[in-house]
Amino acid sequence: MNENGKFQKGGLTVGELTHHYGSKCALDNVSFKITAGTFCALLGPNGAGKSTLFALLTRLLLPAAGKVTIAGIDLSQNPRTALSKMGVVFQQPTLDLDLTVRQNLYYYAALHGISRPKARSLAERALKRLGMAERVDEKVRTLNGGHRRRTEIARALLHGPELLLLDEPTVGLDPEARRSITRHVHQLAAGDGLTVLWATHLVDEVDDADQLVLLHRGQVAANGICAEVRGSDPLSDFFHRLTGSETQ
Amino acid sequence: MKSALICLIAIVEREGLRFLSQRGRFFAALVRPLVWLIVFAAGFRAALGLSIAPPYQTYITYEVYIVPGLCGMVQLFNGMQSSLSLVYDREMGSMRLLLTSPMPRWWLLVCKLFAGTVISIIQVYAFLAIAALAGIDFPVTGYLLLFPVLLMTGMMMGALGLFLSSTIRQLENFAGVMNFVIFPMFFLSTALYPLWKMAEASTVLRDICAFNPFSHAVEFIRFALYGQINGWALGWTAIAFAIFLAGSLIGYDPARSSVGLKGK
């Protein structure tokens, strides 16, 4: 992140990624590219392979074949540098409920090797960006779902990543909190130049201007600017036509 | 190097903060050995006769004999508590935060081990302070020498917990670990009876006790409490630590397992 709070430009390239769970193929030759500063929605029904893809991108799993490049860095060749360039918000909350917002952010900063004095200013900036600055000393246990999610996003942005991965981050949130977080992350891409990969099964979280990667049964069923890909159909109809799944 | 130290300090601090917020855990950790010391040892005092064997230079009471074993018990249960908490973190998904850090994974696991060991050492010294108040005390040099020894035994037992956590697929399976790993490990050791006493009952049991790494951790602690180093116990503890740590690193290797994906 530079002095103006803008993120460094770094994209994501996924090339022919394949993964199996035993004999079951979870991802089959998945390839797509996200250019720097783009909001990319990874849309797919449950079981499409979104979470497997996230696990491969974050190195929780290693692929059977294929290549991932984050901000120009090969994930398999240089995993530590590649991981340091991404922020991740997992589907399941990963905050420590017994610690305060501040303590959670400091812990995360330390996992990235950031010293306490530097973490203090970075945490302040990240929380301010997400409108959470006044809750810095509250225990996470006392926060509502929306605020917890904001804290997780602030935490993922703390070290100034070039790529932000969010795995169904609005699950379990009320509509207002969902809209607010979706809007905010779109703004991070459009206004601050952050590259975003947002996994979801909810079509109303995707804007027409977003890049859309539609994943179905472990394969890329569509890839492009949402408005161009869906044509004249509403996205929900397009999604249903390609996957046979009902959207929410 | 500096980043690695920052990471280590943060993980120890986090474990410390969690420990402070879970006071019940601290009292449970103290009550367990104290019950053994006050109730069990008092009952067996008359039944068990102990001969003079190193590091003891005179006859000792049974309460004095089992204190090192109870110190080991505190660390063993703490190691399992850490293991349980790792399985829970994995089921709940928060393990992913740790595993997606840019720090080397082996270092993150060692940091977790070290943090758990620091907590167990605090518990052991608290137990020894209460034991001293009850009249069971040791030389000052023993208390000092005990610290590095507890670091090593705690790391060994923590590594065992870490290894087990990498093999346990569901939280519900943890009860099985208690029954088939922890209790046999504790009872088939020198924590409660010396080896020669076990040999009187069965040479096979004696051999199992002699092989059990927990026995060596207990003997390591026992000698340290009297200001002595038991080289044999040190060697066994170091070997067991290396084996358990290697098993943990393999268990948490993303190429070999999907531990980070539990809870999906």
Image (tube, coloured by chain):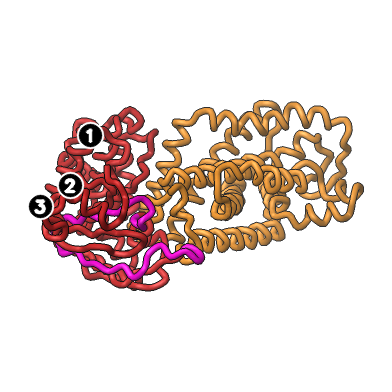
State left or right for residue A233 relative to residue B101.
Answer: left
Q: Which residue appears at 69% of the width and 26% of the height?
A: B134
Q: Which residue appears at 55% of the width and 46% of the height?
A: B170
Q: Which residue appears at 30% of the width and 30% of the height?
A: A143
Chain on which label 3 sits: A
Chain letter for the red colouring in the rendering: A
Q: Nearer the viewer, mark 1 or mark 3?
A: 1
Q: Relative to B21, is A158 above or below?
A: below
Magenta stretch: includes residue B176: no
Please give the residue where the numbered disc 2 appears in the rendered image: A185
Asked whether B228 or A45 is in front, the reply is A45
Helix, strand or loop at label 2? It is: helix
The 10 Å Cα crowd at callout 3, few under 14, some 14 to 19, many 20 or more, is some
Give me the disc on residue A190: 3
Q: Which residues are magenta?
A: A21-50
Q: Is residue B92 visible?
A: yes
Give me the disc on residue B91: none
* Palette colour of chain B: orange
Give how far across and how far down residue A178 sits, in percent.
22, 38
Q: Which residue appears at 17% of the width and 55% of the height?
A: A39
State left or right for residue B170 relative to residue A129.
Answer: right
